[in-house]
Image: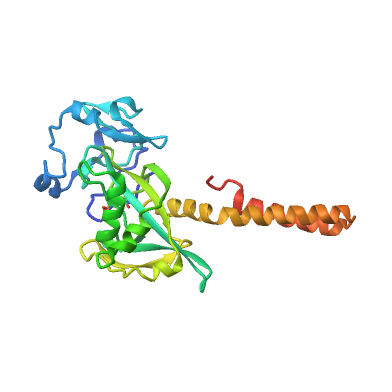
Amino acid sequence: MFPTNHPQYPARITTKDPFYYKNVPYFEGDVLKKYENVWADPRDVNVNDLQDRMTWQNNNLIYLKDSNIKFVNGFPKNSQKTGLAGRGILGRFGPNHAADPIVTRFNLKKMSLEFIAVLRNDTKPAMWAIPGGMVDAGEEFSATLKREFVEEVASKCDKNIIDKIFSNGKTIYSGMVYNDPRTTDDAWIETKVVNYHISYSDSLKLNLTNQDEENYAVKWISCSHPHLYADHKDYIKKVKWLYYKKYYYFTIYSLLIVGLINYKMKNFTKVSYSTLAGIVIYKLFCKNKIK
Ligand code: RP5
């Protein structure tokens, strides 16, 4: 897949071009020079250091040297061709680790599953996103999930409610972010996504405030929002499935029981109606859904 362009990047070239490897435009943001050795790698980073870094594979963190990621001239290469060489504006060669906390609630008034989203200010047009962020050097993923949430949306919230929310999460995904607009052939983002579902009454205790440097706004939005940043829609889909699957399967089993009762009573029209309803619900909501 070809990531969308980032507002600060030059145009990408098509990966179908036979001279791709010669012509792919090089780009490395100025900011990397300023932050070389701070959060950005030095350009002459040692290959052994790079090989000892971690990547997500099948939900486990493994060393790059043990993964299927190829190294070319001492640098790890993205398995997808993106039309841009260099790190772009990402600091690290290869995986740049991030973490995404999805805090959800069920809004009874709107009959809708909602999550806390931020309106990012680095995309054009601005896009709603999960308030995730980069893992600092030596930081645990669990710490990043909480820190990013607090920094981006909850800096004015009571510590007790934050601790309560982050005491119980469910991992939704860990691996590569395929559609982040900052991805290049030499640098990409990998993330761990965790869902924290809270009650509506707890959600009212959160005093949400956005972080001006990164976001225009923060609010609860529907999990059915049609456009989200990077791969965030896929993660939200997984959360929706996790939340709703029990209701779908309960309805299907209930219809099955109604069908069996009617079968015993030789009421075959009702048997076919309940069977049909069960099949429609299964096909629409369960089949091919993320388990
Ligand atoms: C996305 O970029 C990740 O899913 C995460 O949400 C985000 C991390 O980057 P920043 O928000 O820190 O820019 O690919």
Q: State the residue in front, 243 or 159.
A: 159
Q: Quadrant of the C terminus?
A: top right
Residue at 59% in and 54% down? 246
The picture places residue 118, in percent across and down from the top left corner, at 33, 63
Q: Judge whether 72 appears above or below 223 on screen.
A: above
| Residue 284 point in image, percent of width and height | 62, 54
> As drawn, which residue projects farthest toward the bottom?
109
Q: How is the image coloured?
A: rainbow
Q: Residue at x 34, y 28 (%)?
A: 67
From the viewer's perspective, is residue 119 above or below residue 99? Answer: below
- The image quadrant of residue 125 is bottom left
Q: Is residue 218 above or below residue 249?
A: below
Q: Is residue 122 left or right of residue 266?
A: left
Residue 57 picture quarter:
top left
**Residue at the front extreme of this rendering:** 160
Give the residue drawn at x 43%, y 70%.
201
In x, y percent, where is residue 81? Answer: 33, 38
Q: Residue furthest left?
A: 34
Relative side of 129 to 75, left or right: right
Q: Mark yes or no: residue 175 visible.
A: yes
Where in the figure is residue 120, as x and y percent of width and height? 29, 61
**Camera-side residue: 164 or 102?**
164
How many numbered dots are placed on residues in this image? 0
In the picture, which quadrant includes the N terminus?
top left
- Indicate whether 104 appears above or below 190: below
From where the camera sits, is residue 120 visible?
Answer: no
